[in-house]
Amino acid sequence: MSSAKHAPRPEVQPAPQTASAQGSPRARRVEKSADAFRTISEVADELEVPQHVLRFWETKFAQIRPLKRGGGRRYYRPEDIDLLRAIRGLLYDKGYTIKGVQKLIREGGLKLADGEVVPDIPGALEGEEAAAEPSTGHDLPLFKASLTADQVRDVKAAVGELSDLRDRLRRALDACKKAGRS
């Protein structure tokens, strides 16, 4: 061992990060034009869903038709992304089932933020029966409302009355069953 003293090393400060390098992985990507096609990873990041979920939705919704290139690489069009955003909102935020969203599309009730109605593809959803019933939730900013505020209030009041009637009928049925058993 040498008795020579080593000069102290200066502390190295990390380089400051720019705003574009901070945050999520999406923030590090180069911003694309609104009309640009997106890869499955870009869409998955934007919608905050795993890539396999997007692939699964492609099997359930014939309206989602990404362009596929060599090796099966998917490129989503802006209209595909709008539809995926709407589907995600209905499934995750509004509580719809996949069959419920399919029925909504089949009946022409799915409108995108730009007011465009998602077209049904005949034969794509054959043999699937389900009510397009959302759970109670908040309104989505993804869709333009087709009802006035008064109509929305009336519908909500009717739904509340129907829920109360359903609960009363259940209680009456339970009471009848108990009386029959005694």
Image (tube, grey):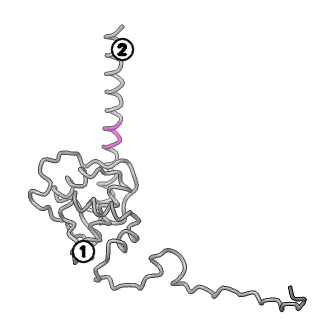
Magenta residues (range): 158-163
Q: Which residue is located at x 32 percent, y 32 percent?
A: 165
- Residue 40: x and y in percent read 32, 71
Q: Earlier in the sequence, mark 1 or mark 2?
A: 1
Q: Main secondary structure of the magenta part?
A: helix
In the displayed structure, 43 sits above or below 120; it is below
Give x and y (percent) for residue 178: 36, 14
Q: Is residue 42 magenta?
A: no
> How many discs appear?
2
The part of the image, by quadrant, that contains residue 177 is: top left
Residue 181, located in which quarter of the rendered image?
top left
Marks 1 and 2, how far apart at CA: 63 Å
Q: Name, please, the residue furthest toward the front.
A: 1
Is residue 12 depicted above or below 70 in this figure?
below
Give the labeled residue for mark 2.
Answer: 178
At a point 31% along the width and 27% down the height, the residue shown is: 169
- Comparing 167 with 54, the one in front is 54
Tell me if 64 is positioned left or right of 45 in this view.
Answer: left
| Rendered-image quadrant of the C terminus | top left
> Which quadrant of the figure contains the N terminus?
bottom right
Q: Nearer the viewer, residue 5 or 90?
A: 5
Read off the residue under disc 1. Answer: 71
Amino acid type indicated by mark 1: Gly
Q: Is residue 169 above or below residue 81?
A: above
Amino acid type, callout 2: Lys
